[in-house]
Image (cartoon, rainbow, N blue to C red):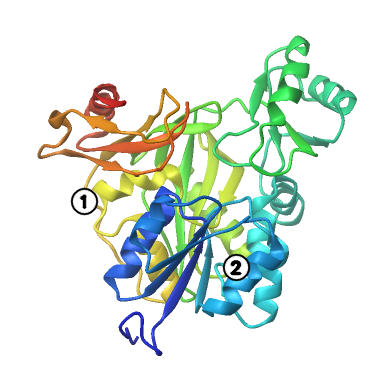
């Protein structure tokens, strides 16, 4: 493997399509290997813009605008980091010989819940909960009765919980219909899922470099309104359930193909494992690996993209807590109590240029036995404010 200097005629380039806090960590890892980083997003001064060699602001769903940047920069690797993106641009770039990670077809399947659910359940025959797809309010009412209450209602295209809700009775359906319009993507079709009676849910970080597949220790997480707030590693689970989770993660990632890190979300009930979703990129719950592993999920993602060996050491247990804004501010300031910076904890501030209620601005990371680390993370996150 050769690592030329960036900003030279022979430099090796990666292009991030989506430049949030996860993309920023990937950009940092790329910088450590001397790769030239181009960060693209829909708004100015996104987190990865701060650490990239060059940045662009563009409508991420505009095929022609994205392709113009790709053809101008000629990146060796294109890394889609968000769901709301022009898939037509990715297919067009791939047809021209550009290396889309993991591949355009995998991105297309995973960015749309209808595509990935039917692929997982009907093609790969993975175990999932019952589901229906609807396009009208009347269809939503019928499907919710069929699925039973409570049921989970999500736009087929969105991210970070936007547009997602739980309907606990028929009286909630019209409200869920309105919430779905808040999707960060396409809300013209919804998936209605029967509520799976699970004990817990996990993220199985699964990494492929074209030669081998490796797994990180399973990550437990807690969500609110469909978005992660706490995660911990490892999630304690039976060996049978863990083996089944890894088998399911390998089957879905083998089916999608390509190189890179995948965040496979699974429900677990006893020893039974159910497929939920998969993202072909680093996962927000996986930020805990910044403190638990010798190679974080971001470093592993980059290694896999480059075809490098995937060995790493699991240092020990830990937890993470996301800090979300309570205010709207065009010049946000994150105030962190100095007690968060000690021998077993630290904070990563994302430096987003604008805050609004519910937007993730920082993460607290704690090293230690899961129960103690998670309890400490819950306390420490209260000592972060945005002003």
Residue in the picture at 78% in, 12% down: 170
Residue in the picture at 29% in, 60% down: 295
> Quadrant location of residue 62?
bottom right
Question: What is the C-alpha distance between the residues marked 2 and 1?
Answer: 29 Å
Whether pointer 2 and pointer 1 mark residues with C-beta atoms closer than 8 Å, the reply is no
- Quarter of the rendering occupied by the N terminus: bottom left
> Quadrant location of residue 182?
top right
As drawn, 319 above or below 173 = below
Residue hosting label 2? 257
As drawn, 249 above or below 2 = above
> In terms of sequence position, does the residue under pointer 2 or pointer 1 come before the other?
2
Could you tell me residue 13's position as x and y percent? 44, 77
The answer to whether one can see residue 236 in this image is: no
| Left-right relation of 109 to 312 | right
| Left-right relation of 297 to 269 | left
Residue in the picture at 60% in, 25% down: 197
145 or 343, nearer to the observer: 343
Q: What element carries label 1?
A: loop
Res 315 label: 1
The single residue placed furthest to the left in the displayed view is 343
The answer to whether one can see residue 18 in this image is: yes
Could you tell me residue 263's position as x and y percent? 50, 51
The single residue placed furthest to the right in the displayed view is 138
- Quarter of the rendering occupied by the C terminus: top left
Could you tell me residue 135's position as x and y percent? 85, 35
């Amino acid at each position: 493997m050769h690592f030329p200097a960036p900003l030279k005629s022979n430099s090796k380039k990666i292009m991030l399509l989506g430049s949030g806090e996860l993309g920023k960590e990937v950009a940092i890892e790329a910088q450590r290997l001397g790769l030239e980083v181009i960060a693209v997003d829909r708004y100015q001064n996104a987190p990865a813009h701060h650490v990239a060699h060059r940045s662009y602001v563009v409508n991420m769903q505009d095929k022609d605008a994205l392709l113009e940047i790709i053809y101008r920069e000629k990146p060796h690797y294109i890394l889609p980091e968000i769901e709301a993106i022009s898939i037509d641009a990715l297919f067009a770039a791939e047809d021209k010989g550009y290396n889309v990670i993991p591949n355009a077809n995998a991105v297309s399947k995973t960015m749309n819940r209808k595509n990935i659910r039917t692929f997982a359940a009907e093609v790969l025959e993975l175990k999932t909960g019952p589901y229906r797809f609807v396009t009208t309010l009347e269809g939503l009412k019928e499907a919710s009765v069929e699925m039973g209450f409570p049921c989970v209602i999500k736009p087929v295209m969105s991210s970070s919980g936007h547009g997602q809700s739980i309907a606990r009775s028929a009286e909630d359906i019209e409200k869920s219909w309105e919430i779905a319009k808040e999707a960060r993507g396409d809300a013209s079709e919804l998936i209605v899922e029967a509520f799976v009676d699970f004990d817990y849910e996990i993220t199985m970080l699964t990494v492929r470099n074209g030669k081998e597949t490796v797994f990180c220790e399973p990550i437990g997480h807690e969500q609110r309104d469909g978005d992660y707030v706490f995660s911990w590693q490892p999630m304690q689970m039976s060996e049978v359930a863990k083996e089944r989770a890894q088998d399911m993660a390998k089957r879905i990632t083998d089916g999608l193909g390509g190189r890179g890190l995948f965040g496979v979300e699974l429900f677990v009930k006893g020893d039974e494992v159910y497929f939920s979703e998969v993202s072909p990129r680093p996962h927000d719950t996986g930020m805990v690996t910044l403190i638990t592993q010798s190679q974080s999920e971001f470093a592993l993602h980059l290694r896999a993209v480059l075809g490098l060996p995937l060995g790493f050491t699991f240092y020990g247990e830990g937890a993470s807590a996301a800090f979300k804004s309570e205010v709207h501010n065009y010049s946000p300031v994150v105030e962190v109590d100095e007690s968060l910076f000690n021998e077993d904890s630290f904070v990563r501030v994302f430096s987003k240029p604008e805050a609004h209620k519910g937007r993730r601005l920082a993460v607290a990371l704690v090293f230690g036995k899961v129960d103690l680390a998670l309890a400490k993370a819950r306390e420490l996150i209260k000592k972060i404010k945005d002003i």
